[in-house]
Every structure is written in structure tokens, then in C-alpha cells.
Image (tube, rainbow, N blue to C red):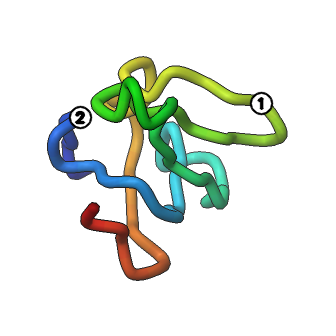
């Protein structure tokens, strides 16, 4: 399982699974706001979660070209 940090995950769409025993889920990572662009959020199963709670858990695979701005 590849470990990620907040600096390695950029806004965009990913496949995520919390452990190898569950199927991949599509999640969207985005900036909280333009005023707080260092704070990332994750839209996962219809809810929005602070990215710092999930980044170091599970496996991540980018599924679209990531936004670099």
C-alpha cells in the first residue's frame, strides 16, 4: 500500500479504498476555498471530509489529470 502525504495529493479525481478488502471508490479532492487553498477537502460518498483524515489511510490512484494551480 502506497503512503501519501498532504503535499503529494493535489486537487483532482482519484480512486480510493481504505483497505485492500473493499472495492475502489471514486473521490474528488478539492481546495477548501481560495482564501485557504492549503486546506484540502475530499468529497467521498456524498459527504465532505477534511483531507488530512484520509490521506495517510488506504490506497490512492489518480484517475484524471491533476490540477497543478
**67 or 33: which is nearer to us?**
33
The image shows residue 15 at horizontal and vertical percentages of 53, 62
Gap between marks 2 and 1 measured at Cα = 19 Å
Give the residue furthest to the bottom.
Answer: 65
Q: Image point 61% across, 53% down: which residue?
A: 27
On screen, residue 63 versus residue 43, left or right, reads: left
The image shows residue 32 at horizontal and vertical percentages of 50, 30
**Secondary structure state at the residue bearing disc 2:** loop
Q: Which mark is residue 4?
A: none
Q: Image point 58% across, 46% down: which residue?
A: 21
Q: Image point 41% across, 54% down: which residue?
A: 11
Q: Earlier in the sequence, mark 2 or mark 1?
A: 2
On screen, residue 2 versus residue 35, left or right, reads: left
On screen, residue 64 versus residue 25, left or right, reads: left
Give the residue furthest to the front.
Answer: 35
Q: Quadrant of the C terminus?
A: bottom left
**9 or 17: which is nearer to us?**
9
Q: Which mark is residue 47?
A: 1
**Secondary structure state at the residue bearing disc 1:** strand
Q: Image point 31% across, 53% down: which residue?
A: 10
Using a 10 Å C-alpha cutoff, classify the residue at mark 1 as few (fewer than 14 neighbours), some (14 to 19) or many (20 or more): few
Above/below status of 58 relative to 25:
above
Above/below status of 61 relative to 51:
below
How many dots with numbers? Answer: 2
- Residue under pointer 2: 6
The image shows residue 31 at horizontal and vertical percentages of 45, 40
What is the quadrant of residue 52 in the picture?
top left
Amino acid at each position: 500500500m502506497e503512503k501519501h502525504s498532504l503535499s503529494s495529493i493535489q486537487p483532482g479525481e482519484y480512486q480510493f479504498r481504505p483497505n485492500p478488502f473493499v472495492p475502489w471508490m471514486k473521490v474528488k479532492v478539492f481546495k477548501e476555498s481560495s482564501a485557504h487553498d492549503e486546506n484540502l477537502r475530499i468529497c467521498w460518498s456524498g459527504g465532505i471530509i477534511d483531507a488530512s483524515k484520509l490521506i495517510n489511510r488506504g490506497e490512492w490512484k489518480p484517475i484524471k489529470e491533476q490540477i497543478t494551480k
